[in-house]
Image (cartoon, grey):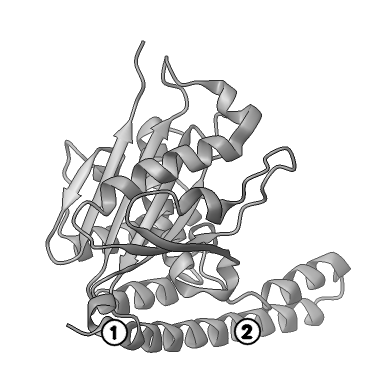
């Protein structure tokens, strides 16, 4: 086997996090997600086409809203600024899923379902009895701890992995950088941080991690019924279909529990609740 062929079997892993802020009633969970893909060329081409279509739709919708505002006599300047600035972002984010953007997000998910990939995440209940709140005095240390735990578990059967993580500011008091710490994990060949706006795969991690967090919050009663919540629920339902999971009357939020799905694309969720 050639050098090139052997490295084709080593995946790229993309990492994002959620909930590193101090625990509050709106953000009771801390999570780290890892999306793995082995062959990137064809999947990147397809996803970027979806991304450009998504951006075009955003621009069109923003222009329509701007025209509506300009036709009104009482136009507020900051409303126009907000509309125009919103049209400049082409980044997929779970929090941006609304009834207006839902179709584009579903199309991205459908395109993704044509390829092989895997997603693993760990979700920690910040209100667990034995959860250590001191993690927030050094969020960086906590972020690295859970990232290492996730990567070790996810790469058990891989020859190696190259990791790219969404950029997170490192405290000045912490001397070691992200790459130096992560490269110490067994099987990690190389690592770097990147801006999620410039990398579609990091945006996918945000969507999948956001879906797990959404179900967890819905079960906790943190997210209530609304038009925005309904759009997000439709997206998560399509994700469930993609990975071969189903809701039921007794379990309307399956991602709020630990999950192991391997229909075609592996989707694993580990919920951690520390007990004294």
**Which element type, helix, strand or loop, lies under badge 1?**
helix
Mark 2: few/some/many CA within 10 Å (<14, 14-19, 20+): some
Q: At x 26% / y 68%, what residue is drawn?
A: 117
- Distance CA(mark 2)–CA(mark 1): 41 Å
Q: At x 29% / y 80%, what residue is drawn?
A: 39
* View extreme (left): residue: 263
Q: Is residue 143 above or below residue 100?
A: above
Residue 273 x %, y %: 34, 25
Residue 21 x %, y %: 61, 37
Residue 7 x %, y %: 28, 76
According to the picture, the residue beneath numbered tag 2 turns out to be 59
Q: At x 68% / y 84%, what residue is drawn?
A: 63
Q: Are marks 2 and 1 in contact (CB under 8 Å)?
A: no
Q: Who is closer to the viewer here, 105 or 135?
A: 135
Quadrant of the snapshot with the C terminus: top left
According to the picture, the residue beneath numbered tag 1 turns out to be 4
Residue 246 shows in this picture = no
Q: Is residue 269 left or right of residue 26?
A: left
Q: Is residue 263 above or below residue 3?
A: above
Q: Who is closer to the viewer here, 11 or 225?
A: 11
Q: Is residue 258 left or right of residue 97?
A: left
Of callouts 2 and 1, which one flags the residue occurring earlier in the amino acid sequence? 1
Q: Is residue 129 left or right of residue 138?
A: left
Q: At x 32% / y 65%, what residue is drawn?
A: 36
Q: Is residue 206 left or right of residue 25?
A: left
């Amino acid at each position: 086997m050639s050098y090139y062929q052997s490295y084709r079997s080593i995946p790229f892993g993309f990492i994002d996090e959620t909930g590193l802020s101090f625990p509050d009633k709106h953000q009771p969970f801390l999570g780290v997600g890892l999306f793995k893909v082995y062959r990137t060329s064809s999947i990147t081409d397809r996803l970027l086409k979806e991304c450009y279509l998504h951006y075009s739709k955003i621009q069109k919708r923003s222009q329509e809203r701007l025209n509506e505002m300009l036709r009104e006599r009482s136009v507020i300047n900051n409303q126009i600024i907000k509309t125009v600035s919103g049209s400049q972002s082409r980044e997929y984010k779970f929090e941006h899923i609304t009834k207006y953007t839902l179709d584009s997000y579903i199309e991205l998910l459908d395109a993704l379902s044509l390829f092989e990939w895997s997603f693993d995440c760990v979700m920690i209940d910040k209100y667990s009895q034995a959860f250590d709140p001191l993690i927030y005095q050094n969020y960086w240390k906590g972020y690295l701890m859970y990232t290492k735990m996730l990567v070790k578990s996810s790469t058990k059967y891989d020859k190696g992995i190259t990791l790219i993580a969404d950029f997170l500011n490192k405290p000045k008091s912490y001397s070691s950088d992200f790459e130096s710490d992560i490269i110490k994990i067994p099987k990690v060949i190389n690592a770097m941080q990147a801006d999620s706006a410039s990398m579609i795969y990091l945006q996918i991690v945000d969507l999948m991690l956001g879906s797990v967090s959404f179900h967890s919050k819905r079960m906790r009663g943190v997210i209530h019924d609304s038009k925005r919540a309904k759009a997000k629920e439709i997206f998560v339902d399509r994700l469930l279909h993609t990975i071969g999971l189903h809701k039921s009357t007794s379990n309307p939020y399956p991602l709020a529990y630990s999950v192991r799905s391997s229909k075609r694309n592996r989707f694993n969720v580990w919920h951690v609740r520390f007990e004294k």
